[in-house]
Amino acid sequence: MLFQTLDDKKDCVGVYLNGELVYDKLPAGISQTWDYSTFLRDHDVDYAKIYCGGKTLNEVCPPHLRTQWDAISSRLRAYFRSFQFAKVSLDENCFFDMVPKQFLLDYCEVKNRVTQHVLDTYERPANYDFIKDLSVALDDMRYQRLNIDIGALRPLYHKAPTRKFMKSVQKYTPYCKYNIWGTKTGRLTSIPGSFPILTIDKQYRSVLKPNNDWFLELDYNAAELRVAMALAGQEQPENDIHQWNIDNIFGPMDRQDAKRGIFSWLYGRKNIDAALTTNDGTVEKLLQETYGRERIVSEHWTGTHVRTRFNRTIPSDRHHALSYIIQSSCVDVVLRRLIQITERLRDLKSRVAFTLHDSIVIDLANEDRGLIPELINLFGQNELGRFKVNVQAGRDFGTMKALNL
């Protein structure tokens, strides 16, 4: 049964169904709508936005509905501008309480028709269930208010960049809101206006403090290299992969040089082969055997698209194919762990605070410290094997220290 939600927050339950507005409880039999809302978490619903790969309603609106959609979306934008002008927060108020009933009826009816068009014309994506589960996990973070302490930067206030950051951060809402559809590879981006967690300079991270007792960060040791090694069919080293490369491929050299060298070789940057290759070609041979650069491309690139093991299809030329394969696979490995850990913590005081590229940061309560080994295990074991996990903890996000467990 097709319906539309009137808001996306847990405490703002309202839907449009069969030409009527229904509040406070969900009618039986609802099954199809445009996009996920928090109060739909425990309901079996199909989401048209996933079918069309995250396109907007405006992008998928069919020609025969264009005039109606343009008119109603213009009114919608006018309401949003008025909220902004009046400094009314949609994070703290229900949308349906602030607009006329007739507008909601008109808007939802057109939205219904666009949604039905998408469900009728787009095929269900192969990774539909994953995107649906990811939407739920990211929504859990969406309305968890960050504990931001600008005072933590007081010692740096004499620096102009610090004052600029402190001024700019007040313009953002104190929430981490992610866009699933922001990049080709599936790497998350931040929704404009939300806290810029993905781009915040390391020197300013101390403004973020846990709402519980600790931040616990889990990330992989050399995630992209481990993904490449797994795709090439090689076993994972248990120790630091850059040291492993020194011991087994490059020979004695500085770790940073080894790190730069392997990434330059893997992604085919200029002048690196001569720097790494011995006279008999031993290093090049070992690199190919271990990381299988050409094999990975041949198994995942069709000539026009990359197809990953995680059911992503990405338009690509030969030059970008390897980076798309590895980076997209790495993203999917991490985000699947995010989903798993979010579910594990669902009924506990601790929760996932945010995710940054290849890591997950948990807002950990002291009472849940006994779960740390289990969380490390959940993060380390993935669809491509068992990866070495780096673990850090701290009283704020800027003073994280490694934990050797």
Image: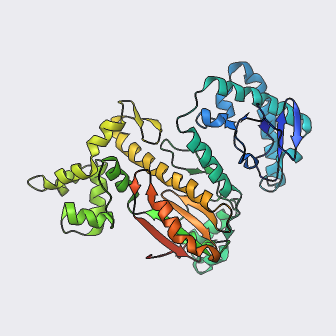
Residue located 33% across and 67% down the image: 239
Residue located 33% across and 36% down the image: 318
The quarter of the image holding the C terminus is bottom left
Q: In the displayed image of the protein, which residue is found farthest to the bottom? A: 155
Q: In the displayed image of the protein, which residue is found farthest to the left? A: 280
Q: Nearer the viewer, residue 16 or 383?
A: 383
In this rendering, is residue 216 above or below 265? below
In this rendering, is residue 200 above or below 59? below
Q: Taking 285 as reference, is 382 left or right?
A: right
Q: Taking 318 as reference, is 208 left or right?
A: right
Residue 58's quadrant in the figure?
top right
Q: How many marks?
A: 0
Q: In the displayed image of the protein, which residue is found farthest to the top? A: 64
In this rendering, is residue 55 above or below 8? above
Residue 98 can be seen in this image: no
Instruction: Locate residue 152, reporting x and y percent.
Output: 62, 77
Q: Taking 252 as reference, is 348 left or right?
A: right
Instruction: Locate residue 310, reporting x and y percent.
Output: 46, 42
Residue 370 can be seen in this image: yes
Instruction: Locate residue 86, reporting x and y percent.
Output: 84, 53
Q: Nearer the viewer, residue 193 or 235?
A: 235
The quarter of the image holding the N terminus is top right
Instruction: Locate residue 311, reporting x and y percent.
Output: 47, 38
Q: Taking 355 as reference, is 308 left or right?
A: left
Residue 140's quadrant in the figure?
bottom right
Q: Which coloring applies here?
A: rainbow
Q: In the displayed image of the protein, which residue is found farthest to the right? A: 101
Q: Nearer the viewer, residue 289 or 254?
A: 289
